[in-house]
Image (cartoon, grey):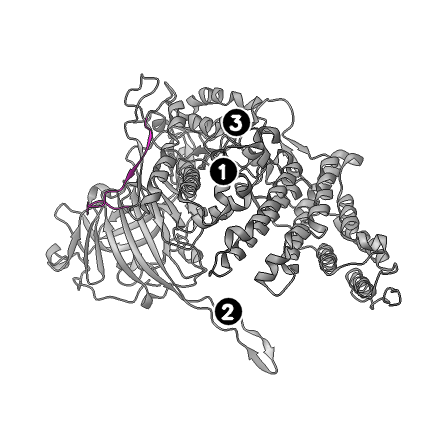
Amino acid sequence: MPIPALTRVMALLVAANLCAAPPRPAAPKGEARTPPAVAPRPEAPRSPEGEPRPFDKVVTADFKTQEGLFRVHSHKGRHLFEIPKAELGREMLLIASVKASPAGVGYPGQGAGSITVRWELREHKVLLRLCSHVALVDPASELAPSVKAMGTETIMAAFPVETFGKDGAPVVDLTRFFSGDIGELHVKQAVQGSMADPGRSFIEQVRAFPENLNIETLLTYNPAAMPPLPGVLGHAGVLPSPPARTAVVVYSMVRLPATPMMPRLADERVGYFGQSVLDFAKEDHEASRRAFIARWRLEKKDPAAERSEPVKPIVFYIDPATPAKWVPFIKRAVEAWQPAFEAAGFLNAIQAREAPRDDPAWSMDDARYSCIRWIPSTTANAMGPHVSDPRSGEILEAKIEIYHNVLQIASDWYFTQVAPLDPRARTLPLPDDLMGDILAFVVTHEVGHSLGLAHNFKASSAYTLAQIRDKAWVKRNGHVPSIMDYSRFNYVAQPEDGLDPADLIPRIGAYDRLAIQWGYTPVPGAARPEDEKAFLAKLLEPQKNAPWLQFSNPRAEGTDPGDQAEAVGDIDAVKATALGLRNLKRVMDLLPGATLKPGENLDKLARGYEALLDQWSRELGHVAALVGGWTSTPRFGTDPGVQFTPVSRERQQEAVRFLNEQLFRTPAWILREEILRKLEPGSGQVQLLGVQRGLLNALLAPSRTSRLEDQEAVLGAKAYTAAHLLADLRKGIFSELQTGTRVDPYRRNLQRAFLEVLASRLAPAPAQTLVLGPQGPVRQRLNPLDDTRGAVRAELKAIQALCARPAADRATAIHQADLKDQIARYLDPRASAPAAASAPAR
C-alpha cells in the first residue's frame, strides 16, 4: 500500500565512494568493462558514426526471443537485451549465487553478493549504475542537498546501443558482461579464484520471467599466483600451480516494487535479519544508525477483522524432484507456522503447495515463486535464504534449499543424542516415519529463516533441567522455546523420565510465536515506522519476566554460557552435560548393534563412532563456556539492573573440575576396544588427544583469559582468575607427578599438549577483532594489557618442579625429563636440556 512516511523520508543514494568501486574507463569499442570477460565474439558491424542500426539488421530472423522483464534475443552465444523504457531508471537487484563448484570449494546455492542497480539511457549508451541506500534525510531539510551530493552513483559499465525496439527500447549486448566476473559481486571470493579466463567462460542459458532475468554462466577462473619458494640446493623452489576453478554461476536481475513497503524498525529484543542505514532525519544532534527488519508484505483482505486472510499469502512450492515420501512432511513443516501468524492477525498466511509438473511456463527460477528445492548433493546442509528489498526490508522471494545428505547428519544427531530414549532409533537407518519427523524439524527451522527470523541460541537455557525432563511439561511446551535455536534433540532427558519420543524433537515455541506476532501484526493508524514503536513495545512486555520469550543478547558478543549452539539445558551446563554423557555411554553400547550388518563393511560403525566423539566434544564445550563467562539478562531503556554478570567463581571451578574428571582423566568408556580394534590398528590416542587439545586451546584462548582479567577487575578476590584456571588444570592433568604414580601413554600425550598450549601463550598472536559468536562474526575487544603470560610462566615453573620428583617407572622418568627439557626451552630458548629425572631400578 502507498506509505505516507516515504513522502517525508526518502532513501538517498549515498556514500558510493565508501561501498562501491570507482567508475572504470571506457574501452575503445563495445562494452566499457576492462578487461573483457570473454574473448571477442563476432558482432554485427556498426555504422561508421557509431549510430544504432535498424532493428531488423541487428535482431535478425535467426534470433530467438524471450519475453519477460527485458526481452532477450539470443543467437549462437550472443545475447541482446531489450530494456523497456518503463524499466529505465527503475531500481533492481542484481544477485549472484553459485549453482555448482569444484569439490571442496564453496557449496551449491552459496550466495555471492547482491547489489542494487538501475539502467540509464544516455544518448546512444546505456549505463548500469550502482545504487546505494545507506542514508536517510528529510527532503525538506537543509542537509538534503549535501547528503545527496555524497552519493554519486558509480557507473559499473556502459554499453553501446545496438538498436532500438519499436517502442524506443534500447537494445544492448550484455554477453561479455554476464559471461565474466562482475567485480562488485563476490563470485571470485566464493570459488577462491583469481581472474576470470575469457576463453573458458560462457553463458549457458538466459531465462526471462515477468519479474526477473536469470543468466546462468560457466565461469572459469585462473589460479592465483603463488610466491616462489626459497632456493633449495642452489635452485629456486617452485610450488605447483593450483588448479583453475570452473563454477556455474547464476546472475539474477530482480525488479524491485514500484512502491516500497513501510519498514518496521528493528528491536534488539527480537531476532530478525535486516539492514541498517545512516539516519540524518532524526533530530538527535547526530547521524545515527537506523535498522529495519526483513519480513514479507502481509496485508489483510479485511483490515477491520481481528483475523483475516492476507491479500497475498506466503506460498512455498515444493520441488518436483523431492522424493514423494518426504512431501507430506515438508508441507507440514511449512504450515506449522500458521498458528504463529494467527496471533499476528492472519489466517492461512503461509501455505505449501506441490509445484506444477506439467506446466512448461512454470519454473522455480521465476522470482514470483518461492520454493523449497531438493538438491541431490553430498553436502549435509539446509538453508533458508531470501531476497529482500534494500529500501524497506520486504522479502520478495525465498528459495529454501534442502541438500539430500542433510538426512544423514540429522540421522547421526538423533542416534547419538536420543537413541536410548526412542526404540525406533536403535537400528540404522532410521525408519521413514521417524526420518520424516526429523526432516520436518529441519525444514521448519529453515522456513523460519525465510520469514526473516535469526537464530536464537539463548532459548536452550530458558527452561530448568527439571522442566525438560518432565513428561507433561515437555508435552505442553517442548524442551526449547524456539525452533530457531540449534538445540536439536533432548539429550538431557533420561530413559526413566518416560518422554514420548515425538516430544524429543524441537517444534515452534513460545518465543517463535511472539517473534512472528511482533514482526507481522499490522499496527492500526501507523503512517511512519516511528508510529509503530509504542504498540510493538507493548507486545514485548511479557519478556521481562519470561526467559522463554527472550532473544540472544547481541551485546554479549559470544560470552554468555547460556547462549550456545547445539546445547540442551545450558541453564546448567555441568548437570546437563553429566546427563548427556549418561546417554552417550548408552549410545556406545548400542552402536555395534545399530550399525553392523552381515556382509556389510564397517563404514557405518566408523561414522557412528565419529559422530559420538563429535557429540561428546560439543557437550564438553558447553561446560568450557562457563569459564570466563558472563551471563546476560536483557535490559532495555530504563529497565533496572545490569545486563551482564560474571559467572561465579564456584561455578567456574565446578566446570574445570568436571572437565578434569570427564575429559582429561582418560575416559575408558570412549576407548571401547571392541570398536576401535575393528576400525584401526591403534588405541584411539589420536582421536582422544584431538578432543582434549581442542578444549585446552578453547580454555586458554586469549579472548577467554582476557575475560577472566576483566572479571578479576570487577570482583577482586572473589574472581576466578587465569592463575586459578591454570593451577586447577595443572592439578588435574599432572596428578600422577604429584602422587608419584605411573603416567600412561594417553596422559603423556595430554601433558605434552598442555605444555605446548601454554607455550603458545608466552608469545600470543595479536587478538582478533572478530570472533565467531552465536549469530556469526562479532566484534572482540582488543586487550593489550593481557598479563596471562606471567601466570603461564609461573605454571611452567611449577610443572618443572613436579618433573624433578622421582618417577614411578622408566617410561615416566623419560617423559618427565622430556617435559623439563621442553619447559626450559619455553622459558628460555637458549637454555640447555636439564638432567633426566631419577627413576627406580627395574
Q: Is the residue under label 2 in contact with that under label 1 (CB below 8 Å)?
A: no
Could you tell me which residue is drawn at 47 percent across and 47 percent down?
Answer: 411
Provide the residue span drawn in magenta: 348-364
SS under mark 3: helix
Q: Position of residue 587 (x, y in %)?
A: 57, 46
Instruction: Look at label 2 and name its amino acid.
Output: Met
Q: Is residue 493 visible?
A: no
Residue 13 placement: quadrant: top left
SS under mark 1: loop
Whether residue 597 is situated above or below residue 423 in the rendered picture: below
Instruction: Look at label 1 and name its amino acid.
Output: His
Label located before the other in sequence (3 or 1)? 1
Could you tell me which residue is drawn at 31 percent across and 59 percent down?
Answer: 179
Q: Is the residue under label 2 in contact with that under label 3 (CB below 8 Å)?
A: no
* Residue placed most toward the observer, 198 or 794: 794
Magenta segment includes 28? no
Q: Position of residue 90 (x, y in %)?
A: 28, 41
Q: Which residue is mark 1?
A: 455
Q: Which mark is residue 226?
A: 2
Q: Which part of the image, by quadrant, shows the N terminus?
A: top left
SS under mark 2: loop
Magenta segment includes 350? yes
Which mark is in front, 3 or 2?
3
Tell me the distance, in whole angstroms, between the alpha carbons under discs 3 and 1. 14 Å
Q: Position of residue 60 (x, y in %)?
A: 12, 59
- Residue extending furthest toward the front: 598
Q: Which residue is mark 3?
A: 549
Residue 752 placement: quadrant: bottom right
Magenta highlight: main SS = loop
